[in-house]
Image (cartoon, rainbow, N blue to C red):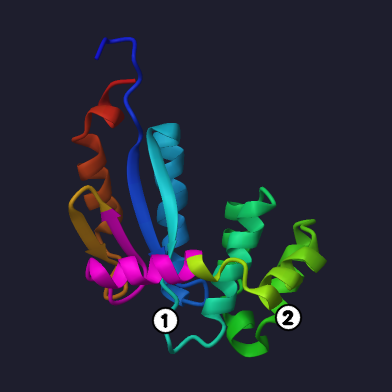
Amino acid sequence: MSDSTPAAPVVLDLWCDLECPDCHRALDDVRALRARYGDRVEIRLRHFPLERHKHAYAAAQAAEEAIEQGRGWPYIEALLARTDDLSGTGEPVLLDVARELGLDVEELDTALIDGRHLLIVDADHAEGKAIGVTGTPTYVIGEERLDGGKSQDGLRERIEEIIDGTPAARGR
């Protein structure tokens, strides 16, 4: 590889339940990582709806439709900011957030009804289980899995240590 060839970004998978208050708190770390590393780090949302959150599965499907409509992260962040509303009010919150962001609300509602994103959510959940994800948020970077469901203390610093040790983060 020549010096002029940019390195591929470091991939950070964020296993998330969109009804989870801990995932809401993790947003500050995600924003800080984006601000520090920009396009040198690719943060990928991976769905891991927990059984105890009865609207998380629908929220994951709605997020996938928002991604289809080109507003994935804004939708995800807005929804995570309303985890209490989602828990209390339920699925109408999914449509409210879509409306607030100017998404095609009818299409999002149809996607929830026809289940067009079920396979993505199910595949993420199955992969998460296979690699040992048990709670959210869980970060996977390289070969390391960091569980933020127990405590988020020190996780961003550990992620930064891992990223700073990779060629993509050091040399663009």
Q: Is residue 53 left or right of residue 67?
A: left
Q: Secondary structure at mark 2?
A: helix
Q: How many marks?
A: 2
Q: Is residue 61 left or right of residue 126?
A: right
Q: Residues within 10 Å of mark 2 (few under 14, many from 20)?
A: few
The residue under the point 57% across, 83% down is: 55
**x then y, percent, for residue 134:** 28, 76
**Among the 4 quarters of the image, the one containing residue 101:** bottom right
**Among the 4 quarters of the image, the one containing residue 74:** bottom right
Say whether residue 128 is visible: yes
- Residue beneath label 1, please? 50
The residue under the point 49% across, 64% down is: 120
The residue under the point 51% across, 71% down is: 18
Query: Tag 2 or tag 1, which sits nearer the N-term?
Result: 1
User: 154 or 87, which lies in front?
Assistant: 87
Amino acid on which the number 1 mark rests in the picture: Leu
The residue under the point 68% across, 74% down is: 114
The disc placed on residue 111 is: none
Q: Quadrant of the N terminus?
A: top left
Say whether residue 81 is visible: no
- What stretch of residues is rendered in magenta? 120-140
* In magenta segment, residue 47: no
* In magenta segment, residue 122: yes
- Residue beneath label 2, please? 92
User: 36 or 4, which lies in front?
Assistant: 4
Q: Is residue 102 left or right of residue 164?
A: right
**x then y, percent, for residue 30:** 43, 52
Please determine whether, in this image, residue 147 is positioned above or below residue 3. below
Amino acid on which the number 2 mark rests in the picture: Pro
Q: Residues within 10 Å of mark 1 (few under 14, many from 20)?
A: some
Q: Is residue 119 left or right of residue 107?
A: left
